[in-house]
Amino acid sequence: MDNVLITGGAGFVGSALAIGVKSNHPRTRVIALDNLKRRGSELNLPRLRDAGVDFVHGDIRNPGDLEGLGGVDLMLECSAEPSVLAGYGDSPGYVIDTNLGGTIHCLEFARKRGTAMIFLSTSRVYPMKALNQLNFVEDATRFSLAPEQTVAGVSENGISEDFPLAGPRSLYGATKLASELILEEYREAYGLRGLVNRCGVIAGPRQMGKVDQGVVALWAARHVYGGSLSYIGYGGAGKQVRDLLHIDDLLDLILYQMDRLEELDGETFNVGGGADISASLCELTDLCREISGNTIEIGSEAEDRPGDIRLYITDNARVTGRTGWRPKKDLRTIVQDTVSWLESNEAQLKPILGP
Ligand SMILES: NC(=O)c1ccc[n+]([C@@H]2O[C@H](COP(=O)([O-])OP(=O)(O)OC[C@H]3O[C@@H](n4cnc5c(N)ncnc54)[C@H](O)[C@@H]3O)[C@@H](O)[C@H]2O)c1
């Protein structure tokens, strides 16, 4: 592959993929395009440069910013407003224009050049109400999926691609699902090659965690730099659960997919840490306390936050069946790697991730 373009290439996921692709394919020109909207993304620019990645300051909302880029064999579409709260109580303009309008511009770019696309989608395409109505068990520290469920696409192993799609899912989730649908039409109408990864929570070093996005980095940063946190919703006891995928595991999957684009064309995969690599908020607190050596104040608000879900666990059966990939880095490694990054880069990161 001669040229790979990574949109959102200065972000948490995009920069890790850009640097990972470049180091695994040194002869490939890797271009990272980003508008640097996310605070902290600018810190990745020296890393990109040192790795030999070409950075372009551009915005996918402006087709002209993409046009000048020349031929590209593969686009990894990682640019987004990734907050599930985006648009709530505010204008939905940015989230729609970037996550849907911008992705359509990326697809147009790809159509004109015969570029393949790997689209970073989200588990948030699955509707909130349906997820919140699943049978669950409440243990001392977490909610878990109950063995008996009446809905398709769910088992104790988690949520599969067969989970029903009817119902609201947040503006973030809706713009991602709409983009998936348009991508499918581009495949059908124009022969575009593409595949979709619906990722659960991704975590690890260099995530610029904030209250509405990047929970592990937020939790770890508060423990390392101080400040307070709150368990919000579902009784306020911090029992809501997510599976967590180490960014290095995602990179491994993307590298595999890049090498097998023809074989995997048209696939949609749920991708995440799975049931074995998951944590509730209060379990995450315990691990952050242990690894950072610090204890901080954690408040409690019983009322649910809009757009929130009680639990989400990825069922990786399809992606593992098709690719053999499975996540390797466990929960402790995810938290340890994040805490080590925060401790080693305090001067740079505290102004962004501190209280
Ligand atoms: N982090 C997660 O837990 C997670 C989970 C599921 C899916 N995803 C998806 O992965 C992708 C990457 O997310 P991330 O965690 O790296 O988020 P991020 O915010 O760290 O990175 C996104 C990058 O896109 C850039 N960007 C935003 N709007 C842009 C625009 N209009 N034009 C160009 N660049 C723009 C931002 O500046 C940022 O650097 C997103 O598509 C997101 O939806 C992330």
Image: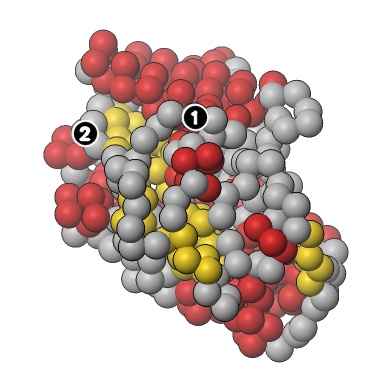
Query: Is 107 placed above or below 163 here?
Result: above
Disc 2 versus disc 1: nearer the observer? 1
Residue in the image at 41% along x and 15% along y? 108
Q: Tag 2: Cα neighbours inside 10 Å, few (<14), some, or many (≥20)?
A: some
Q: Answer with mark 2 or mark 1, whichever residue precedes in sequence.
A: 1
Q: Is residue 213 above or below residue 286?
A: above
The residue identified by callout 2 is: 265
Residue 138 is situated, as x and y percent measured from the top left of the image, at 53, 69
Q: Secondary structure at mark 1?
A: loop
Q: Which residue is mark 1?
A: 167
The picture places residue 332, in percent across and down from the top left corner, at: 50, 79
Pinpoint residue 250: horizontal percent, then vertical percent. Answer: 39, 56
Left or right: where 35 falls relative to 33: right
Instruction: Identify which amino acid the numbered label 1 is placed on.
Output: Gly
| Residue 59 vs residue 313, the one in the foreground | 313
How much space separates mark 2 and mark 1, taking CA atoms? 28 Å
